[in-house]
Amino acid sequence: MRVSRTVKKAAATAATALLLVTGPLSLAPAVAAAQPAAQPTRPNSVPPPVDRSLLDQPAEPKPDVSTYQRNSKGCIASNTGNRPVVPKPHAQMVLRLDDAHRFATGKGVKIAIIDTGVEEHPRLKGRVEAGGDYVVAAEKGVVDCDGHGTEVAGVAAASKDDSTGFVGAAPDAQILAIRQTSDRYESKDPADPRKSAGKVTTLAQAIVRAVDRGADVINISLTSCDTPKEPSTGERKLQAAIDWAVNERNVVIVTAAGNIGTDGTGCPEQNDNQNTDTVKVIASPPWYSKDVLSVASISDRGEPSTFSVWGPWVSIAAPGEDITTLDPKGQGLTNANADERGALTTIQGTSFASPYVAGIAALVRERFPDLTARQVMDRLTMTAQHPGNPNGKDHKVGAGMINPIAALTAELPSERAGAVAPEIKPITTDLGLGNEKDMTPLIVALSGTGIGVGLLLLTLFVVHTVNRNRNRSVIRRI
């Protein structure tokens, strides 16, 4: 009886082992419960879709409050001071602007400078058009109390003076001056008191105004910085204006990427997240990088400037440190600005990297007049000096330093008439894998072999167990 029970246990154990070896002969197919498709979450670095219904209609510029009043800062004076000015700055040399001007100078191209106004400096004489004013309507955009707009215009389009050698990126381009902001004016309106003039809604209106006045390129060296959140109505209006300008009216828009600053003049922190799709701060208009060229700053060492705001929206880079440009209230050049205490500070910022790109965009528009705005943008990014990343782009400098010579001379297959993207085909090899075979016979054979091996193991196990118990019985009888 003991042997019989042992054999039964052995048989049960072996059967279990056989099931594990061979698997079940058939299984009912599992039916997954239907789940609703998850809605993709938009990363906070990506703006919402454009709402074109928010687009402003062209209108004569005027302040967005009843009146702006001059504050205690007063207008700037000549900025040259006692600092020596390098007539041919590093930016002009590294961009090889003198060589680029063999191919184009911006003649016949209009660059709108939406900023603090543009004074008609002697190196801009006869090329500044009054485009409008959202601070003091009567001044038409050609009074620059801050100096910033004139300095930006100098980088973009100052004519060459052989006595100094300094020249802007597009020395023959026309300038459309639009004053949209100023920190020398403040609002006393009880409903909207502010320490400076201008807001996002008037920036949107200024873009529409620039397009309506025939701008081919728009430079915006202004940045609004905020924490990631759903955009305001003003931001949505700005987005609609940019989309309309580029996609409907064929205008190139170039904007500064923004500066880091803790004094209320810039973004309070850097977008140094490991996941670049998630950001700490949003810089606008750069946020709308699908339709704008957002420009980062490069130092004279060839590195991203420490103040330049990072983000997945950064498109391209240009020099933005140790800037030499036109003296807004003088006749010559300057490389410094006086702060509120009268101390001179070096001119730098993405504000001055942006007009280099805007000016070079004007050169491309002159040389290739049939290109669309988007093709101009693509040409600038495709011919830039790309960073050493696998995809040739990063969130610090975008596609890299702008390369004017390449932008003006490269032949891009994508621009040829009727060009289409090449069809992506899999790589083939001569080592064929043969014809696909019916695997059913092999599966049946392997299954039979597995069952046979399992039965053999079962038999050996039973025989071994019986023999072992018999031996134990003999020992006990002795």
Image: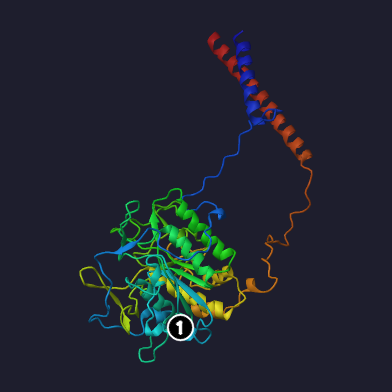
Instruction: Judge whether residue 57 can be spotted in this image.
Output: yes
Coloring applied to the structure: rainbow
Q: Is residue 179 above or below residue 14?
A: below
Q: Residue at coordinates 69% horizontally, 63% vertically from top-left?
A: 423
Q: Where is residue 354 in the image (x, y as percent from the top left)?
A: 43, 70
Label 1 SS: loop
Instruction: Judge whether residue 271 can be spotted in this image.
Output: no
Q: Where is residue 389 in the image (x, y as percent from the top left)?
A: 48, 64
Which quadrant holds the N terminus? top right
Q: Position of residue 434 (x, y in %)?
A: 77, 53
Q: Residue at coordinates 63% horizontally, 73% vertically from top-left?
A: 415
Instruction: Name the side, left or right, on which 450 lies relative to 40.
Output: right
Q: Name the residue under label 1.
A: 171
Nearer-the-camera pick, 243 or 228: 243
Instruction: Name the side, left or right, on which 476 lies relative to 330.
Output: right
Nearer-the-camera pick, 427 or 9: 427
- Residue furthest toward the left? 341
Which quadrant holds the C terminus? top right
Q: How many labels does the image show?
A: 1
Nearer-the-camera pick, 473 or 358: 358
Q: Where is residue 396 in the image (x, y as percent from the top left)?
A: 42, 63
Q: Is residue 37 above or below residue 207?
A: above
Classed neighbour count for the residue bearing mark 1: other residues with Cα under 10 Å, few (<14), some (14–19), many (≥20): many
Q: Is residue 256 above or below residue 97?
A: above
Amino acid bearing label 1: Pro
Give the quarter of the image for residue 130. Answer: bottom left
Q: Residue at coordinates 33% horizontally, 75% vertically from top-left?
A: 322
